[in-house]
Image: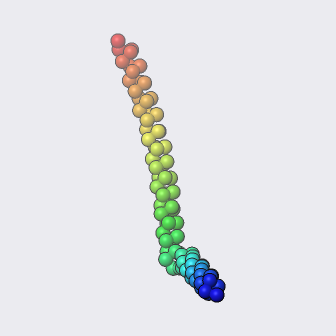
Amino acid sequence: MWVFFFVSLAIVCTVWAWTRYLTAKTQAKTELTGGEEYRGLSDEYRRLADMAVTAQEHTELKLGDIAVQMAQLRGQLESVQRILKDVE
């Protein structure tokens, strides 16, 4: 008889603990995905991603400008080398 009592008590405690766990898990998930803080963080991450894309685009433009300047310098260097060869 005592064994039945303790087994029943163990089952009730297990069910109670499992119910509390599921309730806490559901509440945490709801707060995380539906909360104002989550929306604020997602907006901030979106803004940071946009800034990163903009910075990358500016970097690509600057690299293009530098490539053009390097080509011009290479042309000038070649012409100076030709002039020096002619002077020799």
Residue at horizontal 51%, vertical 79%? 36
The picture places residue 86, in percent across and down from the top left corner, at 39, 14
Query: Quick check: 87 left or right of 6?
Result: left
Of residues 51 and 7, which is closer to you in this image?
Answer: 7
Counting every numbered tag in the picture gives: 0
Residue at horizontal 43%, vertical 30%? 74
**Quadrant in which residue 85 is drawn:** top left
Residue at horizontal 47%, vertical 63%? 48
Of residues 54 and 15, which is closer to you in this image?
Answer: 15
**Quick check: can you spot residue 58?**
yes
**Quadrant in which residue 22 is drawn:** bottom right
Residue that sits furthest to the front in the current view = 1
Quarter that holds the N terminus: bottom right
Residue that sits furthest to the top in the current view = 88
Position of 64 relative to 6 (above/below): above
Residue at horizontal 49%, vertical 77%? 37
The picture places residue 11, in percent across and down from the top left corner, at 62, 82
